[in-house]
Amino acid sequence: MTDGMAQDYIELPKAKPEHGKITLTLKPVVDPGIADSLADFKEGRTYGPFETHEELVRSLHDETAKLRSKRTSRI
């Protein structure tokens, strides 16, 4: 994950002056792995949904075959 992506999901507390007081608003922090997953989802890099487990297994095998063919074609 790049530093730019981290900034999209991890925010520092916000300070806001109100009626002579300072109010801090905390934002939830998202784990970097989850942030990467959310970014992939937004970019459309997902598979499924699958109706059956056979469809899931077929998809896994197809994607693995694509990766293997790319790897061997570089040599």
Image (cartoon, rainbow, N blue to C red):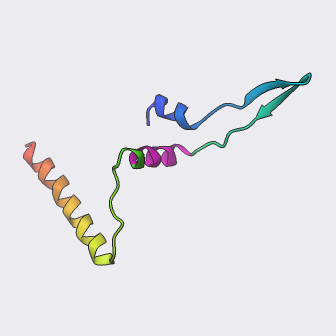
Q: Residue at x 44, y 32 (%)?
A: 2
Q: Nearer the viewer, residue 41 or 3?
A: 41
Q: Position of residue 34 (x, y in %)?
A: 51, 49
Q: Position of residue 37 (x, y in %)?
A: 44, 49
Q: Residue at x 27, y 73 (%)?
A: 55
65 sits left or right of 30 in the view: left
Relative to 1, is 57 above or below? below
* Magenta portion: prevailing SS class: helix
- Image quarter where the N terminus lies is top left
Q: Residue furthest right?
A: 20
Q: Which of the 4 image quadrants contains residue 68?
A: bottom left
Q: Residue at x 50, y 44 (%)?
A: 35
Read off the magenta span.
31-40
Q: Which of the 4 image quadrants contains residue 36?
A: top left
10 sits left or right of 18 in the view: left
Q: Position of residue 5 (x, y in %)?
A: 47, 34
Q: Nearer the viewer, residue 3 or 27?
A: 27
